[in-house]
Image (cartoon, rainbow, N blue to C red):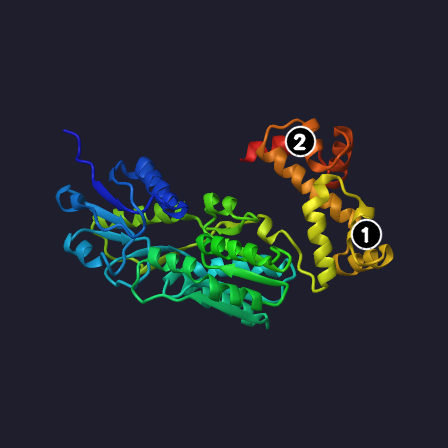
Amino acid sequence: MSPTRNKIALLVESSRAYGRGLLRGIAHYSHTRANWFLLHQEMTIDTKLPSWLKNSGISGVIARVDEHNVDNLRDLKLPIVDVRCSVDYPDIPRVETDDRAVARLAFQHLWERDFRRFAFCGFQFAHFSEARLRHFREFVENAGAPLSIYQSPGEHGALLTDLEQSGLEDFKELSKWLKSLEAPTGLLVCNDIRGQHVLNTCQSLKISVPDDTSIIGVDNDEAICLLSNPPLSSVIPDSEAVGFRAAETLQLLMNGENDFNPIEYIQPRGVSQRLSTHVHAVEDREIARVCRYIRENACEGINVADVVRYSMLSRRQLERRFRSLLNKTPHEQITEVQVERVKQLLTETSMTLDQLSELTGYSHKERLSAVFKRETGITPGEHRRLNTASS
């Protein structure tokens, strides 16, 4: 007679990239270590507990626990692991992304791009927003830099979806705050949803991103990041590792082991840079304006003469300021933008070199190949093979 498989209830949303990562990590543990029977239904982060929970013969639960569902979960009298971690429940072990490491990665990303003024935008009373703000403030203050803060108003105990909705309804106050930021400023938003709010507001106010305000989010939800304008850079949490560790912890609880850590923190994986932070901050507003022109037009085939005509500076002044502030020439800046675009298209598409030449400002593929090899040390074909193999 074969042993009975444990039924595990997964009360984790599938509507967000982070939740889907948790589910993948849990599934990986089950498939490789436990052979569980997993029970899950389509849900959002604030969905009420499903009616089937009490009568399904489950052995344990991995859930996004909060004050709205914790009592009903405890009534099940089953092992529970929390992967939301919004409140400290001493009797329920928690596994969470390390928000201090998230804030450190975001700060370092902006600092390395020469930002020396910082800002944070979040949701008041959202636990992860408060945690990321606390840690980000620590890193900014340790660097001796100024920090401006704005959080959408909310109510303690409100659902996260309601707090996020408030971020769509405070356009006037958010606009006032964004206009108060001195350029250039590096801005951390508490998550990618907040980042999309901020980017939309910047666009309506004609605030240049990333030149005036450079914005980085958290969660690396590609559906949100790539729909944003410009595409949003974001800290990448290791949600699969969080899910895997939560599953390990639940198995220990079901085995009768109660000597658990109250909370375990999982390190984020890094930063996915997109156009919202693809810049080096410069205090010189004319050079920042010219850099934006180059970034937006380099792949249209512009040359230095076009840049000089756009600028309010003479060619000599422009060259001198570029050398002083960026340690490069306007021509080198044009080439850098073109090469980065070629890299992106080589990685994300199967376009031929002839097609790439037309889209990146080169007169013919031979010229593109020569410049690419000179700047990167490898041919376009080698770059494509290397990046296809690693993806």
> What's the residue type where badge 2 is placed?
Glu
Of the residues shown, which amino acid type is indicated by label 1? Val
Element marked by disc 2: helix
| Above/below status of 230 relative to 356 | below
Q: Which mark is residue 382?
A: 2
* Quadrant of the rendered image containing residue 24: top left
| Residue 251 coordinates in the image, percent (x, y) | 26, 46
Q: Quadrant of residue 131?
A: bottom left
Vertical placement of residue 97 versus 139, above or below: above
Question: Which residue is nearer to you in this view: 99 or 349?
Answer: 349
* Left or right, 324 with reference to 20: right
Against 330, is 174 above or below? below
Q: Which mark is residue 330?
A: none
Q: Where is residue 3 in the image (x, y as percent from the top left)?
A: 17, 34
Task: Describe the element under mark 1 as helix, strand or loop.
Answer: helix
| Quarter of the figure that contains the N terminus | top left
Tell which residue pokes out farthest to the right in this image: 316
Task: Give the x, y percent position of residue 340.
Answer: 67, 42
In this rendering, would 132 be left or right of 212? left
Near mark 1 (Cα within 10 A), the count class, few <14, some 14-19 or many ≥20, is some
Where does label 1 land, which residue?
308
Instruction: Pick whichever, 144 or 267, lies toward us.
Output: 144
Q: Do the residues labelled 1 and 2 touch (CB within 8 Å)?
A: no
Between 250 and 332, which is closer to the camera in this rendering?
332
Question: Disc 1 to disc 2, how far (Cα)?
Answer: 35 Å
Q: Residues within 10 Å of mark 2 (few under 14, many from 20)?
A: few
Nearer-the-camera pick, 151 or 98: 151
Between circles 1 and 2, the one closer to the viewer is 1
Q: Which of marks 1 and 2 is nearer the N terminus?
A: 1
Residue at the image position 58 percent from the left and 72 percent from the top:
146
The x and y percentages for residue 92 are 25, 58
Indicate left or right for 161 with 192 as reference. Answer: left
